[in-house]
Image (cartoon, rainbow, N blue to C red):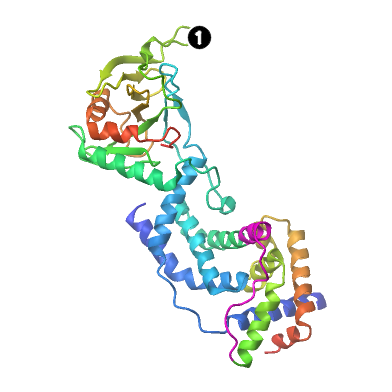
Amino acid sequence: MSPERESQFDEFVAARYAALRRTGYLLCGDWHRAEDLVQATLIKLYARWSRLRDPQSAAGYARTTLTRTYIDGRRRRSSGELTGLDLPEQAAAGPDSDRRLALLAALAQVSPRYRAVLVLRYWEDQSIEETSAILGVSTGAVRSDAHRGLAQLRAILGESLSDIAAI
Amino acid sequence: MTSQNDAERVHRMTAALFQEVLAQPEPDPPQVLGEVRRGGRRLRRRRRLAVGAGALVVLALCGAGAVVAVESRPTSVGPAAGGTGGPEHQDGMDQLDKVHDRMLAALRANLPAGYVNVVDGSGPTTFGLVRPDGGTVAVAAVMGSNPLPAGTYPRNPCDAAGPAGQAYFADCRSVTLPDGSTGWLSKGTTNPVTGVTLATPQGKVFGLGGVPGGGGHDVGPAPLDDLEALVRAPQVAAALQSVPMDAPS
Protein backbone atom coordinates (compact mmCIF):
# COMPACT_ATOMS: atom_id res chain seq x y z
CA MET A 1 0.00 0.00 0.00
CA SER A 2 1.35 3.44 -0.85
CA PRO A 3 2.55 5.73 1.96
CA GLU A 4 -0.29 8.10 1.10
CA ARG A 5 -2.90 5.40 1.56
CA GLU A 6 -1.23 4.26 4.77
CA SER A 7 -1.39 7.82 6.00
CA GLN A 8 -5.05 8.10 5.07
CA PHE A 9 -5.74 4.96 7.07
CA ASP A 10 -3.95 6.40 10.11
CA GLU A 11 -6.04 9.53 9.81
CA PHE A 12 -9.22 7.53 9.56
CA VAL A 13 -8.40 5.55 12.70
CA ALA A 14 -7.46 8.69 14.61
CA ALA A 15 -10.69 10.40 13.58
CA ARG A 16 -13.11 7.50 13.94
CA TYR A 17 -11.78 5.23 16.66
CA ALA A 18 -13.66 6.82 19.54
CA ALA A 19 -16.98 6.88 17.70
CA LEU A 20 -16.60 3.27 16.61
CA ARG A 21 -15.81 2.21 20.16
CA ARG A 22 -18.87 4.02 21.49
CA THR A 23 -21.07 2.23 18.98
CA GLY A 24 -19.36 -1.01 19.91
CA TYR A 25 -20.02 -0.31 23.58
CA LEU A 26 -23.70 0.28 22.92
CA LEU A 27 -23.83 -3.02 21.09
CA CYS A 28 -22.03 -5.16 23.63
CA GLY A 29 -22.03 -3.17 26.90
CA ASP A 30 -18.36 -3.65 27.71
CA TRP A 31 -15.42 -1.42 26.84
CA HIS A 32 -12.93 -4.26 26.42
CA ARG A 33 -15.19 -6.18 24.11
CA ALA A 34 -16.01 -2.98 22.27
CA GLU A 35 -12.29 -2.50 21.68
CA ASP A 36 -12.03 -6.05 20.39
CA LEU A 37 -14.92 -5.38 18.02
CA VAL A 38 -13.30 -2.19 16.76
CA GLN A 39 -9.94 -3.87 16.31
CA ALA A 40 -11.51 -6.71 14.33
CA THR A 41 -13.32 -4.11 12.25
CA LEU A 42 -10.17 -2.09 11.56
CA ILE A 43 -8.27 -5.23 10.57
CA LYS A 44 -10.91 -6.03 7.97
CA LEU A 45 -10.94 -2.42 6.83
CA TYR A 46 -7.14 -2.29 6.52
CA ALA A 47 -7.16 -5.49 4.46
CA ARG A 48 -9.51 -3.77 2.04
CA TRP A 49 -8.19 -0.23 2.30
CA SER A 50 -6.11 -0.16 -0.87
CA ARG A 51 -9.16 -1.20 -2.88
CA LEU A 52 -11.54 1.37 -1.46
CA ARG A 53 -12.03 3.75 -4.34
CA ASP A 54 -13.53 6.40 -2.15
CA PRO A 55 -12.02 6.82 1.32
CA GLN A 56 -15.28 8.49 2.29
CA SER A 57 -16.96 5.12 2.03
CA ALA A 58 -14.70 3.80 4.77
CA ALA A 59 -16.97 5.06 7.55
CA GLY A 60 -19.92 3.17 6.14
CA TYR A 61 -17.86 0.05 5.60
CA ALA A 62 -16.57 0.23 9.17
CA ARG A 63 -20.08 0.70 10.57
CA THR A 64 -21.34 -2.28 8.61
CA THR A 65 -18.40 -4.45 9.58
CA LEU A 66 -18.63 -3.53 13.25
CA THR A 67 -22.30 -4.37 13.43
CA ARG A 68 -22.04 -7.63 11.55
CA THR A 69 -19.01 -8.69 13.55
CA TYR A 70 -21.00 -8.12 16.73
CA ILE A 71 -23.99 -10.10 15.49
CA ASP A 72 -21.86 -12.91 14.11
CA GLY A 73 -19.93 -13.09 17.38
CA ARG A 74 -23.12 -13.29 19.40
CA ARG A 75 -24.44 -15.98 17.11
CA ARG A 76 -21.30 -18.04 17.61
CA ARG A 77 -21.38 -17.52 21.35
CA SER A 78 -25.00 -18.48 21.61
CA SER A 79 -24.37 -21.69 19.69
CA GLY A 80 -21.08 -22.61 21.31
CA GLU A 81 -21.08 -21.32 24.83
CA LEU A 82 -23.34 -21.23 27.77
CA THR A 83 -23.13 -17.66 28.83
CA GLY A 84 -25.33 -15.39 30.79
CA LEU A 85 -26.51 -12.01 29.76
CA ASP A 86 -24.04 -9.35 28.69
CA LEU A 87 -24.17 -7.77 32.07
CA PRO A 88 -21.93 -4.75 32.58
CA GLU A 89 -18.79 -5.43 34.52
CA GLN A 90 -18.29 -2.09 36.24
CA ALA A 91 -19.04 -1.73 39.91
CA ALA A 92 -21.84 0.62 40.70
CA ALA A 93 -20.90 3.89 42.35
CA GLY A 94 -23.71 6.30 43.03
CA PRO A 95 -27.19 6.87 41.66
CA ASP A 96 -26.07 7.78 38.16
CA SER A 97 -24.04 4.61 37.87
CA ASP A 98 -26.89 2.56 39.26
CA ARG A 99 -29.17 3.99 36.64
CA ARG A 100 -26.65 3.48 33.86
CA LEU A 101 -26.07 -0.09 34.93
CA ALA A 102 -29.79 -0.68 34.97
CA LEU A 103 -30.01 0.64 31.41
CA LEU A 104 -27.11 -1.52 30.32
CA ALA A 105 -28.67 -4.54 31.97
CA ALA A 106 -31.91 -3.80 30.13
CA LEU A 107 -30.10 -3.46 26.81
CA ALA A 108 -28.36 -6.74 27.51
CA GLN A 109 -31.71 -8.46 27.52
CA VAL A 110 -32.63 -7.17 24.08
CA SER A 111 -31.93 -9.68 21.32
CA PRO A 112 -28.64 -8.92 19.51
CA ARG A 113 -30.21 -8.13 16.16
CA TYR A 114 -32.91 -5.96 17.71
CA ARG A 115 -30.23 -4.17 19.68
CA ALA A 116 -28.18 -3.65 16.53
CA VAL A 117 -31.20 -2.19 14.76
CA LEU A 118 -31.86 0.19 17.68
CA VAL A 119 -28.24 1.33 17.78
CA LEU A 120 -28.09 1.84 14.03
CA ARG A 121 -31.43 3.61 13.81
CA TYR A 122 -31.35 5.78 16.93
CA TRP A 123 -27.64 6.25 17.71
CA GLU A 124 -26.04 6.13 14.28
CA ASP A 125 -29.05 7.87 12.71
CA GLN A 126 -29.24 5.39 9.87
CA SER A 127 -32.44 5.30 7.85
CA ILE A 128 -34.59 2.20 7.54
CA GLU A 129 -33.08 1.58 4.12
CA GLU A 130 -29.50 2.12 5.31
CA THR A 131 -30.04 -0.16 8.28
CA SER A 132 -31.52 -2.76 5.97
CA ALA A 133 -28.41 -2.64 3.77
CA ILE A 134 -26.03 -2.82 6.72
CA LEU A 135 -27.69 -5.87 8.21
CA GLY A 136 -28.56 -7.51 4.94
CA VAL A 137 -32.23 -7.83 5.80
CA SER A 138 -35.40 -6.38 4.30
CA THR A 139 -36.72 -2.99 5.29
CA GLY A 140 -39.76 -4.76 6.69
CA ALA A 141 -37.52 -6.79 8.96
CA VAL A 142 -35.81 -3.61 10.16
CA ARG A 143 -39.16 -2.03 11.03
CA SER A 144 -40.25 -5.19 12.77
CA ASP A 145 -36.96 -5.58 14.67
CA ALA A 146 -37.04 -1.95 15.81
CA HIS A 147 -40.59 -2.34 17.01
CA ARG A 148 -39.82 -5.54 18.88
CA GLY A 149 -36.57 -4.18 20.31
CA LEU A 150 -38.35 -1.14 21.67
CA ALA A 151 -41.10 -3.36 23.04
CA GLN A 152 -38.49 -5.43 24.88
CA LEU A 153 -36.94 -2.28 26.32
CA ARG A 154 -40.33 -0.96 27.43
CA ALA A 155 -41.17 -4.27 29.05
CA ILE A 156 -37.92 -4.18 31.02
CA LEU A 157 -37.67 -0.50 31.84
CA GLY A 158 -41.34 0.39 32.12
CA GLU A 159 -41.99 4.04 32.89
CA SER A 160 -38.32 4.85 33.34
CA LEU A 161 -37.92 4.74 29.56
CA SER A 162 -40.19 7.74 29.29
CA ASP A 163 -38.23 9.44 32.08
CA ILE A 164 -35.12 9.25 29.99
CA ALA A 165 -36.76 11.18 27.17
CA ALA A 166 -37.58 13.95 29.57
CA ILE A 167 -33.96 14.49 30.62
CA MET B 1 -48.63 13.97 11.71
CA THR B 2 -49.25 12.19 14.99
CA SER B 3 -47.47 9.16 13.68
CA GLN B 4 -44.51 11.29 12.71
CA ASN B 5 -44.47 12.90 16.13
CA ASP B 6 -44.53 9.48 17.72
CA ALA B 7 -41.63 8.36 15.58
CA GLU B 8 -39.64 11.44 16.50
CA ARG B 9 -40.42 10.93 20.16
CA VAL B 10 -39.27 7.32 20.02
CA HIS B 11 -36.13 8.38 18.21
CA ARG B 12 -35.40 11.08 20.79
CA MET B 13 -36.16 8.79 23.70
CA THR B 14 -33.96 5.95 22.51
CA ALA B 15 -31.10 8.27 21.55
CA ALA B 16 -31.32 9.77 25.05
CA LEU B 17 -31.11 6.30 26.56
CA PHE B 18 -27.96 5.58 24.59
CA GLN B 19 -26.56 8.97 25.53
CA GLU B 20 -27.09 8.22 29.19
CA VAL B 21 -25.47 4.81 28.88
CA LEU B 22 -22.41 6.54 27.43
CA ALA B 23 -22.36 9.37 29.98
CA GLN B 24 -19.26 8.13 31.76
CA PRO B 25 -15.51 8.59 31.47
CA GLU B 26 -14.14 6.56 28.59
CA PRO B 27 -10.97 4.50 28.80
CA ASP B 28 -7.93 5.85 27.00
CA PRO B 29 -7.83 4.60 23.42
CA PRO B 30 -5.38 1.72 23.10
CA GLN B 31 -2.55 1.70 20.56
CA VAL B 32 -4.02 -0.51 17.88
CA LEU B 33 -2.39 0.47 14.61
CA GLY B 34 0.47 -2.01 14.77
CA GLU B 35 -1.76 -4.97 15.50
CA VAL B 36 -4.33 -3.78 12.97
CA ARG B 37 -1.72 -3.63 10.21
CA ARG B 38 -0.35 -7.07 11.05
CA GLY B 39 -3.84 -8.54 11.21
CA GLY B 40 -4.91 -6.77 8.03
CA ARG B 41 -1.95 -8.13 6.07
CA ARG B 42 -2.64 -11.63 7.35
CA LEU B 43 -6.27 -11.28 6.39
CA ARG B 44 -5.38 -10.17 2.88
CA ARG B 45 -3.30 -13.30 2.49
CA ARG B 46 -6.09 -15.48 3.84
CA ARG B 47 -8.54 -13.96 1.42
CA ARG B 48 -6.24 -14.64 -1.47
CA LEU B 49 -6.00 -18.17 -0.24
CA ALA B 50 -9.77 -18.37 0.04
CA VAL B 51 -10.37 -17.21 -3.47
CA GLY B 52 -7.67 -19.45 -4.79
CA ALA B 53 -5.43 -16.59 -5.82
CA GLY B 54 -7.03 -16.43 -9.21
CA ALA B 55 -6.75 -18.52 -12.28
CA LEU B 56 -4.42 -21.47 -12.33
CA VAL B 57 -2.25 -22.20 -15.30
CA VAL B 58 -1.58 -25.90 -15.37
CA LEU B 59 1.90 -26.57 -16.53
CA ALA B 60 0.97 -30.23 -16.83
CA LEU B 61 4.47 -31.37 -16.28
CA CYS B 62 5.05 -35.08 -16.06
CA GLY B 63 1.70 -35.84 -14.57
CA ALA B 64 2.82 -34.36 -11.31
CA GLY B 65 0.15 -31.73 -11.52
CA ALA B 66 2.58 -28.98 -10.75
CA VAL B 67 0.89 -25.66 -11.11
CA VAL B 68 1.79 -22.06 -10.96
CA ALA B 69 -0.79 -19.62 -9.73
CA VAL B 70 -1.18 -16.65 -11.95
CA GLU B 71 -1.48 -13.34 -10.23
CA SER B 72 -4.90 -11.83 -10.32
CA ARG B 73 -6.90 -9.50 -8.22
CA PRO B 74 -9.02 -11.10 -5.52
CA THR B 75 -12.73 -10.92 -5.95
CA SER B 76 -14.59 -8.39 -3.92
CA VAL B 77 -14.98 -9.39 -0.31
CA GLY B 78 -17.68 -7.68 1.63
CA PRO B 79 -17.88 -6.90 5.32
CA ALA B 80 -19.87 -10.03 5.93
CA ALA B 81 -16.94 -12.10 4.88
CA GLY B 82 -15.78 -12.25 8.44
CA GLY B 83 -12.30 -13.16 9.49
CA THR B 84 -11.26 -15.77 7.03
CA GLY B 85 -14.03 -16.46 4.61
CA GLY B 86 -12.67 -19.83 3.69
CA PRO B 87 -10.80 -22.91 4.73
CA GLU B 88 -7.73 -22.42 6.80
CA HIS B 89 -4.44 -23.37 5.25
CA GLN B 90 -3.23 -26.70 6.52
CA ASP B 91 -0.03 -25.21 7.88
CA GLY B 92 -1.62 -22.13 9.31
CA MET B 93 -0.96 -18.52 8.52
CA ASP B 94 2.10 -18.33 10.76
CA GLN B 95 3.71 -21.06 8.72
CA LEU B 96 2.80 -19.24 5.54
CA ASP B 97 4.35 -16.06 6.88
CA LYS B 98 7.57 -17.96 7.53
CA VAL B 99 7.58 -19.39 4.01
CA HIS B 100 7.02 -15.91 2.60
CA ASP B 101 9.85 -14.42 4.66
CA ARG B 102 12.20 -17.25 3.75
CA MET B 103 11.48 -16.89 0.05
CA LEU B 104 11.83 -13.12 0.15
CA ALA B 105 15.19 -13.33 1.91
CA ALA B 106 16.42 -16.00 -0.51
CA LEU B 107 15.39 -14.03 -3.60
CA ARG B 108 16.92 -10.82 -2.25
CA ALA B 109 20.20 -12.56 -1.53
CA ASN B 110 20.37 -14.22 -4.93
CA LEU B 111 19.05 -11.68 -7.39
CA PRO B 112 20.10 -12.46 -10.96
CA ALA B 113 22.06 -9.82 -12.84
CA GLY B 114 19.84 -7.04 -14.12
CA TYR B 115 17.63 -6.71 -11.05
CA VAL B 116 17.95 -4.34 -8.13
CA ASN B 117 15.25 -5.37 -5.66
CA VAL B 118 12.48 -7.79 -4.75
CA VAL B 119 9.02 -6.67 -3.67
CA ASP B 120 5.95 -8.52 -2.47
CA GLY B 121 3.53 -9.67 -5.13
CA SER B 122 -0.13 -10.48 -4.92
CA GLY B 123 0.27 -13.39 -2.54
CA PRO B 124 2.60 -14.83 0.06
CA THR B 125 4.64 -16.82 -2.47
CA THR B 126 4.52 -14.34 -5.31
CA PHE B 127 7.16 -11.65 -5.71
CA GLY B 128 8.21 -8.96 -8.10
CA LEU B 129 11.81 -8.73 -9.28
CA VAL B 130 12.54 -5.05 -9.85
CA ARG B 131 14.77 -3.86 -12.70
CA PRO B 132 16.78 -0.64 -12.63
CA ASP B 133 14.21 1.07 -14.85
CA GLY B 134 11.44 0.27 -12.35
CA GLY B 135 9.91 -2.52 -14.40
CA THR B 136 8.98 -5.66 -12.48
CA VAL B 137 8.99 -9.31 -13.38
CA ALA B 138 6.60 -11.42 -11.33
CA VAL B 139 7.66 -14.84 -10.11
CA ALA B 140 5.69 -17.35 -8.06
CA ALA B 141 6.50 -20.58 -6.30
CA VAL B 142 5.40 -23.75 -8.02
CA MET B 143 2.98 -25.89 -6.07
CA GLY B 144 3.35 -29.60 -6.58
CA SER B 145 -0.06 -31.11 -6.09
CA ASN B 146 1.46 -34.47 -5.27
CA PRO B 147 5.01 -35.68 -4.77
CA LEU B 148 6.50 -37.99 -7.35
CA PRO B 149 7.67 -41.47 -6.45
CA ALA B 150 11.24 -41.27 -5.13
CA GLY B 151 13.78 -41.47 -7.91
CA THR B 152 11.45 -40.25 -10.64
CA TYR B 153 11.54 -36.80 -12.18
CA PRO B 154 9.40 -34.50 -14.30
CA ARG B 155 9.14 -35.40 -17.95
CA ASN B 156 10.00 -32.98 -20.71
CA PRO B 157 6.98 -30.66 -20.97
CA CYS B 158 7.71 -30.10 -24.65
CA ASP B 159 6.73 -33.72 -25.20
CA ALA B 160 3.21 -33.00 -24.01
CA ALA B 161 0.76 -32.21 -26.78
CA GLY B 162 -2.88 -31.22 -26.94
CA PRO B 163 -5.64 -33.21 -28.62
CA ALA B 164 -4.79 -31.72 -32.00
CA GLY B 165 -1.12 -32.33 -31.51
CA GLN B 166 -0.41 -28.75 -30.60
CA ALA B 167 2.51 -28.08 -28.23
CA TYR B 168 1.82 -26.15 -25.05
CA PHE B 169 5.47 -25.56 -24.20
CA ALA B 170 8.59 -24.57 -26.04
CA ASP B 171 12.26 -23.89 -25.40
CA CYS B 172 12.43 -26.76 -22.89
CA ARG B 173 15.78 -27.21 -21.18
CA SER B 174 16.80 -29.85 -18.67
CA VAL B 175 18.14 -28.66 -15.31
CA THR B 176 19.93 -30.73 -12.68
CA LEU B 177 21.05 -29.23 -9.38
CA PRO B 178 24.03 -30.38 -7.30
CA ASP B 179 21.70 -32.09 -4.81
CA GLY B 180 20.31 -34.27 -7.57
CA SER B 181 17.08 -32.37 -8.07
CA THR B 182 16.15 -32.57 -11.73
CA GLY B 183 13.57 -30.92 -13.91
CA TRP B 184 12.82 -28.68 -16.85
CA LEU B 185 12.73 -25.06 -17.83
CA SER B 186 9.98 -24.21 -20.29
CA LYS B 187 8.05 -21.42 -21.89
CA GLY B 188 4.33 -21.45 -22.58
CA THR B 189 3.14 -21.25 -26.16
CA THR B 190 -0.47 -20.34 -25.52
CA ASN B 191 0.04 -18.29 -22.33
CA PRO B 192 2.77 -15.78 -21.51
CA VAL B 193 4.33 -17.91 -18.79
CA THR B 194 7.71 -19.36 -18.11
CA GLY B 195 8.63 -21.89 -15.48
CA VAL B 196 11.10 -24.26 -14.01
CA THR B 197 9.80 -27.33 -12.24
CA LEU B 198 12.03 -29.88 -10.55
CA ALA B 199 11.75 -32.83 -8.23
CA THR B 200 14.19 -33.80 -5.52
CA PRO B 201 15.49 -37.39 -5.50
CA GLN B 202 12.89 -37.96 -2.79
CA GLY B 203 10.13 -36.78 -5.11
CA LYS B 204 9.32 -33.37 -3.66
CA VAL B 205 8.19 -31.16 -6.53
CA PHE B 206 9.23 -27.52 -6.44
CA GLY B 207 10.04 -24.69 -8.74
CA LEU B 208 9.44 -21.18 -9.82
CA GLY B 209 7.11 -19.73 -12.41
CA GLY B 210 7.44 -16.51 -14.31
CA VAL B 211 3.93 -15.16 -14.50
CA PRO B 212 2.41 -11.98 -15.90
CA GLY B 213 1.87 -9.68 -12.94
CA GLY B 214 -0.72 -7.42 -14.50
CA GLY B 215 0.52 -4.35 -12.68
CA GLY B 216 1.51 -1.08 -14.29
CA HIS B 217 5.23 -1.86 -14.06
CA ASP B 218 4.98 -5.46 -15.18
CA VAL B 219 7.28 -6.25 -18.08
CA GLY B 220 6.30 -9.86 -18.71
CA PRO B 221 7.26 -13.31 -17.50
CA ALA B 222 10.73 -13.92 -16.09
CA PRO B 223 13.26 -15.03 -18.72
CA LEU B 224 14.30 -18.68 -18.51
CA ASP B 225 17.92 -17.76 -17.76
CA ASP B 226 16.83 -15.76 -14.72
CA LEU B 227 14.64 -18.58 -13.43
CA GLU B 228 17.52 -21.01 -13.85
CA ALA B 229 19.90 -18.70 -12.01
CA LEU B 230 17.45 -18.48 -9.13
CA VAL B 231 16.78 -22.20 -8.69
CA ARG B 232 20.49 -22.93 -8.95
CA ALA B 233 21.02 -20.80 -5.83
CA PRO B 234 20.90 -23.34 -2.96
CA GLN B 235 19.14 -20.83 -0.67
CA VAL B 236 16.36 -20.25 -3.20
CA ALA B 237 16.00 -23.97 -3.95
CA ALA B 238 15.72 -24.73 -0.24
CA ALA B 239 13.12 -22.00 0.22
CA LEU B 240 11.09 -23.31 -2.72
CA GLN B 241 11.23 -26.82 -1.30
CA SER B 242 9.76 -25.49 1.95
CA VAL B 243 6.60 -24.25 0.19
CA PRO B 244 3.64 -26.38 1.31
CA MET B 245 1.90 -28.28 -1.44
CA ASP B 246 -1.20 -26.13 -1.22
CA ALA B 247 0.37 -22.76 -0.52
CA PRO B 248 -1.22 -19.91 -2.42
CA SER B 249 0.90 -17.76 -4.64
Count up the numbered dots.
1
Residue B43 screen position, x and y as percent: 46, 50
Residue A146 screen position, x and y as percent: 74, 68
Farthest residue, direction right: B2
Residue A76 screen position, x and y as percent: 64, 57
Q: Residue at x 43, y 60 (%)?
A: B36
B155 relative position to A101: left or right: left
Please report, as a chain letter, where disc 1 is located.
B
Q: Which residue is mark 1?
A: B163
Q: Residue at x 42, y 66 (%)?
A: B32
A11 relative position to B201: left or right: right
Q: Nearer the viewer, residue A8 or A25?
A: A25
State whether residue A114 is above or below residue A162: above
Q: What range of the chain is rendered magenta? A: A71-93
Q: Is residue A7 visible?
A: yes
State whether residue A49 is above or below residue B240: below
Q: Nearer the viewer, residue B24 or A139?
A: B24
Picture quadrant where residue A69 is located:
bottom right
Q: Residue at x 47, y 70 (%)?
A: A17
Q: Nearer the viewer, residue B104 or B115?
A: B104
Quadrant for the C terminus of chain A, please.
Answer: bottom right
Q: Is residue B8 magenta?
A: no
Q: Is residue A87 magenta?
A: yes
Q: Is residue B5 visible?
A: no
Residue B75 screen position, x and y as percent: 52, 42
Question: What's the residue type where badge 1 is placed?
Answer: Pro
